[in-house]
Amino acid sequence: MHVCKRISNLRLRHSAAPGTSVCRKPVNRRRSFHQVRTAILLAICGSGSLLVAQQGTAGTQLPDPPGAAGPASGAASTAPAKTAALSGTVLDPNGSEIQDARVTLSNLSGTIHRGLQSGSNGEFTFAGLPAGQFQVEVSGKGWGTYVSPEIQLHAGDFKFVSGVVLPPATTASVTVSASPATLSEEQVQIAVKQRVLGVFPNFYSTYDWNAPPMLAKQKFQLAFRSATDPVEIAGVAAIAGFEQYNNNFSSFGSGVSGYAKRFGAAYAGSVTSKMLANALLPSVFRQDPRYFYKGTGSTRSRVLYAFAAAFIARGDNGRWEPNYSHIIGSFASGALSNVYYPSSNRGLTLTLANGAVNIGDSIGTNLLREFVLKRFTSRK
């Protein structure tokens, strides 16, 4: 029969010997059809297994089913997106770093809210941020709270948050319990302890932006303490020696007598300048004679601030105003120098020259205060 012939051929493909007993016996048609169908299915499965085995032996790979993504498309879909980062440093008003401050970052949509503590140098960093608008809030024990403006981050950005300065915490008990006289005396005690390298006076620098004003009595105390400081007197002696060497004010003469006159004139100018510009006139105009250290912002802004401080002062009311005390005091001291300088040098020129020297000295000292002296000033 043809059926037997097909079965025989199929079995031949699968290592069955031709002419088996299947074809020797007559069989029922239904059973024969069932056997044929089974044999065909077995043949198909066997052929599939044989194909897989052959392809595995050849080291090839079955094709992907329709719609399956290849390796290249899979790699592209899993490539990480670029993220942004945000960093900054927490400072106090004097420019010192604040450790263990609580720093919180959140986006304006409210889906991200992260918190951490500032490190030993006041630093903090948030990494792995998506693009968006963020805001940083910082607080610390014994300090107020800083809230940054909105910060826009794009993919791959790394931004530094500048100006993270914590204000002092408001302590009502200190304000209520301490009298103005007590606070003023405390400011003098702080000032006279400030020395560069522990030697040179730095009395008129304050590193507390919110320092309370001094009363008139304390302004005179500080000016007198500065004028009589041994290091200040030694500085005047050095100036007199320089003038002697260059034979400035030759009418004073030479030798010990000439040096003594030069020293006396230089010291008189120093004392009158301090007493007028730092005590008498600040008491009259109610102005603070100290330099308030800025410490933040660009270098250009700090230079301009140090320069302007010779012409603009903080009033005892906390407002900035023209520095009448220093400007008038400098030229008034220059005018008084006509009393003790040689008659050949007296006149308007001497007044203007000494006044200009006093103002120029103030500008130079302010620049040193802003950029150099703080790191070398002891406060003990």
Image: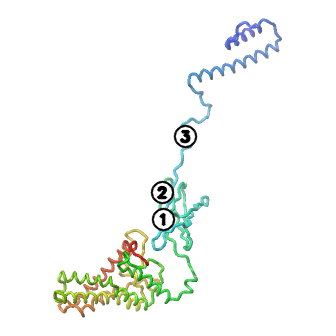
From the image, state whether disc 1 or disc 2 is nearer to you: 1
N-terminal of the pair, mark 3 or mark 2, is 3
Q: Which mark is residue 75?
A: 3
Mark 3 Cα-neighbour bin, 10 Å: few <14, some 14–19, many ≥20:
few
Amino acid type, residue under disc 2 in the picture: Phe
The residue identified by callout 1 is: 121
Whether residue 362 is visible, yes or no, is yes
| Left or right of 119 in this view: 358 | left
Whether residue 105 is visible, yes or no, is no
Residue lying at 54% horizontally and 87% vertically, measured from the top left: 178
Query: In this view of the protein, which residue sits in the foreground, 141 or 363?
Result: 141
Q: Are marks 1 and 2 in contact (CB under 8 Å)?
A: no
Query: In this view of the protein, which residue sits in the foreground, 340 or 112?
Result: 340
Position of the N terminus, as image quadrant, is top right
Tell me if residue 267 comes above or below residue 209 in the rendering: below
Q: Where residue 313 appears, x then y in whole percent?
A: 40, 82
* Cα distance between the residues tagged 1 and 2: 19 Å
Q: Which mark is residue 158?
A: 2
From the image, state whether disc 1 or disc 3 is nearer to you: 1
Element at label 3: helix
N-terminal of the pair, mark 1 or mark 3, is 3
Q: Where residue 305 appears, x then y in whole percent?
A: 38, 75
Mark 1 Cα-neighbour bin, 10 Å: few <14, some 14–19, many ≥20:
some
